[in-house]
Image (cartoon, helix red, strand yellow):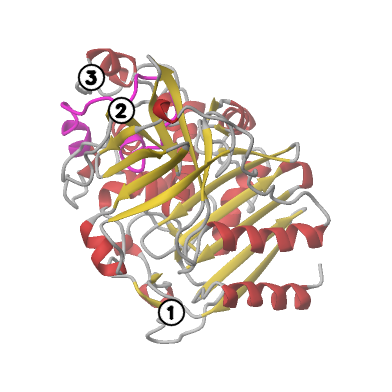
Amino acid sequence: MDLDRMEERLAAIFTEYSTPGAAVGILHRGEVTELVYGIKDVRTAEPVAADTVFQCGSLTKTWTALAFMQLVDEGMVHLDEPVRTYLPRFRVADPDASARVTPRHLLNHTNGIEEAYGDPGEGADVYERMVAQIADAPQVSPVGHTHGYSAALGYAILARIMEVLDGKPWDAIMRERLFGPMGLTATNSWHGDVDATRTASGHLIRSEEEGPIPTPIEYLPRSYGPGGNVTATVGEVLALANVLLSGGVALNGVRIVSDAAVREMMTSRVPVPDPYMFGPHWALGLVVCDWFGTTVYAHDGSTIGQNARMRILPDDDLALVLLTNGGQREAIYKDVFNAILAELGTVTIPPLPEQDRGLALDPSRYVGVYERPGTAFEVTAEGARLHLTVALDPMQAEFMGLPDHITYELLPISETHFLMPPVGPLEDVQTVAIYDFRDGAAQYLHTNSRVHRRTSEGDRIRD
């Protein structure tokens, strides 16, 4: 790779997307390359360095899954035993779900439980509280019925299992089972342990004219810990990728998990209703992508103002990591990774499919309101054309200068899949699945990996 040319190309991409700062990591055939760009914070203009710490967001789930698989290796926990085997008081509103949910359902996001855990606080007992506070949590979908991403709850339950079995808080488990043995000195699971002099600050962009501004929320609540609160340098995220790429061995030569555990993480898969945005299957703490017939393993993460992307290509002995502190998510990651992949002469990221203009749909099958806590979508029809209206969080809408509701056009790819073009220059194209038809009407809407249950025929979210 011509690094000078690559640095110039990537700098142009980051400038195009108004990204304040970024770190790019490449692990290719055992060789590590780290590239940095821009500044950590627009208020200080301090440059990003190789030791700058970024928030990993939901990429944390891969870390947590890896630590959980250590307990599987040791015979302390089994993927297909009910959660109640390890947490006897575990209960949700549905008795069947209470009895049947297993760690595998939690790892691959097919547990179907709503994220209705209230406010568990910021104490070290947060995951114990979350488990106790979901006794009345309903099901978005039956256990094992469909993939539906759990941002916090599913991996918090896994963390509580780990705490009970290991007799330590989750944060200590991560330090002792992963970060320490892997030789990681900058990676943490709790923001209070992070070296503030090395951290990147998150940024949001309300308009191209204003440019990046500091995020009003510096970090996620502690309830997101096992699912979203790991922070790390780009090199130490590459160290995580190396464990998966090398069959369980860290860069320092320490075996972290068995080769069988890594194979289980990669091969235990469930289909994703919307296969286009991330990948057609979800494994255990990993997304499985299909890039023109090449299998790629991935996980993404976003907090409020920072983004993380990891891609692992076993056939090329290659891993790529991108950490940013602002800017668009999907478009920038694709441009950055495609530039590197093309330079290395390997497979690139497939584009989204095109609209099928000859497809004739019955709009009545899709019309309705689809909801889960904190999010509501309404699909409406105008003649043969479908539209989707999303109700924004009022605080988010006010801060970002957006209306309370935004309406998008849905362009059909197939009878169950749609493109959702952006309505503004700072948005990415999204994809949507509307599926599982019963009595002539779809039951679920799946977008951004989240599943939403149909709750009415419509005309509710603007009330």
Circle nearer the N terminus (3, 2) = 3
Mark-to-mark CA distance, 1 and 2: 38 Å
Residues at marks 1 and 2 touching, judged by CB atoms closer than 8 Å: no
Residue 132 located left or right of residue 164:
left
Foreground of the two, 338 or 67: 338
For label 1, the crowd category at 10 Å Cα-Cα, with few meaning under 14, some 14 to 19 and many 20 or more, is some
Q: Which residues are magenta?
A: 128-155
Mark 1 or 3: the one toward you: 1
For label 3, the crowd category at 10 Å Cα-Cα, with few meaning under 14, some 14 to 19 and many 20 or more, is few
Q: Position of residue 445 (x, y in %)?
A: 40, 33
Q: Position of residue 387 (x, y in %)?
A: 41, 44
How would you classify the magenta stretch by its main secondary structure?
loop
Q: Residue at x 41, y 25 (%)?
A: 105
Where on the picture, by quarter, is residue 128?
top left
- Look at the image and say whether residue 221 sits in the magenta stretch: no
Residues at marks 1 and 3 touching, judged by CB atoms closer than 8 Å: no
Amino acid on which the number 1 mark rests in the picture: Gly
Amino acid on which the number 2 mark rests in the picture: Val
The circle drawn on residue 262 is: none
Depicted 341 relative to depicted 379: above or below: below
Q: Residue at x 41, y 83 (%)?
A: 42
Q: Secondary structure at mark 2?
A: loop
Q: Which residue is mark 2?
A: 140
Amino acid on which the number 3 mark rests in the picture: Pro
Circle nearer the N terminus (1, 2) = 2
Q: Which residue is mark 3?
A: 88
